[in-house]
Image (tube, rainbow, N blue to C red):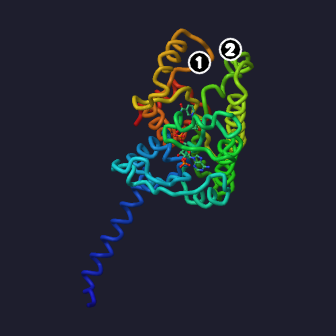
Amino acid sequence: MSLSPSRRLLEACLFVGASRGAAALAATRGGRSLLVLGGSGFVGREVCRNAVERGYRVTSLSRRGVNPEPASALLAQVQWLAGDATDAATVKKLASSADAAVHAIGLLFDAESGLANLNVIVSGSRSVPTSTSTYDRITRQTSFNLIGALKSKMRLPGSARTPVCFVSAAEAGWPEVAYGERVEGFAPAWLKAYLAAKRSVEAELRSASGSIRPVVYRPSLIWNWQKFDVLPAIPIFNVACALGVPFVDKTVRVETLGKAIVAGLEDESVEGVQRYLQMEQLATRL
Ligand SMILES: NC(=O)c1ccc[n+]([C@@H]2O[C@H](COP(=O)([O-])OP(=O)(O)OC[C@H]3O[C@@H](n4cnc5c(N)ncnc54)[C@H](OP(=O)(O)O)[C@@H]3O)[C@@H](O)[C@H]2O)c1
């Protein structure tokens, strides 16, 4: 059945209107796509939740690739992909269509720490490392894959740099605070290796800041009321910080961090290291 000229005109107007609406949405946050490496993790899922709420189209990459909370209406809107972020080609393909990215992959005890079996307890998402899951591969290599992929993307002159949020750790800043280096001298080998990997990523992000906008989050312990393994340590950290111990930062709630990361994606003036006070301030914006 052919359409009358007036009907065709009406549909053309509706199409243009819808396109303008989509463009307007994209001009705010609606059309922006966000890639979250480790989006199913304890931190990553909070980022995904907040990003969906803010109108991002969110894609998560993790080895298992499943929605960690199937009952969540917000997380149901995330595209959950299974893949290994140590594979540069996998990350490059996903990064090519991302307007923003968050790196939330990590592990506390790597394959060489001698403590890898404890990850099933300390990982908020029960992520289990393999025999090749070293800090170098899981923290450094996956991050370098992301940074390299985003750096190589074409950018129009004068256009905004792609925001990239990296979840580092408060202790990565020990060299910058009083007694920090001395404390690190007493740290176990696994913690020194963990921090070396975090610092190598932070340095790579800084060096790439001509083409990407790096935002580095340095939380100490991250928690919520369901994270029973860390709850006993929370008051100890918080009291030490309140007393002014320079190498201990106040702990950060995972809800606060998730909000702070998305707020950091949205504000072009946010760049570089964010400690707990900045995270708390950023989180109030959402
Ligand atoms: N939790 C804390 O108290 C704390 C404190 C300071 C800093 N951090 C940092 O925060 C970040 C997030 O930690 P988290 O507590 O959210 O950890 P988590 O719950 O263990 O989450 C790790 C995420 O990474 C994914 N992953 C691991 N290896 C991967 C790979 N090769 N390729 C793709 N995805 C992979 C995991 O999914 P699969 O297992 O399915 O792959 C999971 O989604 C880490 O960098 C950590 O160092 C955490």
Q: Earlier in the sequence, mark 2 or mark 1?
A: 2
Residue matched to label 2: 178
Q: Nearer the viewer, residue 13 or 28?
A: 28
Taking the image as drawn, is residue 246 in sight? yes
Helix, strand, or loop for circle 2? Answer: loop
Question: Can you say which quadrant of the picture contains the C terminus?
Answer: top left
Mark 1 near ligand 1 (CB under 8 Å)?
no
Q: Position of residue 116 (x, y in %)?
A: 63, 37
Q: Residues within 10 Å of mark 1 (few under 14, many from 20)?
A: many
Residue lying farthest top?
243
Q: CA distance from mark 2 to mark 1?
A: 11 Å
The residue at 53%/18% (across/down) is 237
The residue at 49%/37% (across/down) is 124
The label nearer to you, 2 versus 1, is: 1
Helix, strand, or loop for circle 1? Answer: loop
Please give the count of numbered marks on the rendered protein. Answer: 2
- In the rendered image, which quarter is residue 185 located in? top right
Q: Is residue 114 above or below residue 27?
A: above
Q: Is residue 31 above or below residue 12?
A: above
Taking the image as drawn, is residue 271 in sight? no
* Residue type at numbered disc 2: Ala
Residue matched to label 1: 248
Q: Position of residue 170 (x, y in %)?
A: 60, 26
Q: Position of residue 14 (x, y in %)?
A: 30, 70
The answer to whether residue 233 is left or right of residue 2 is right
Q: Is residue 240 above or below residue 115?
A: above
Q: Position of residue 89 (x, y in %)?
A: 66, 60
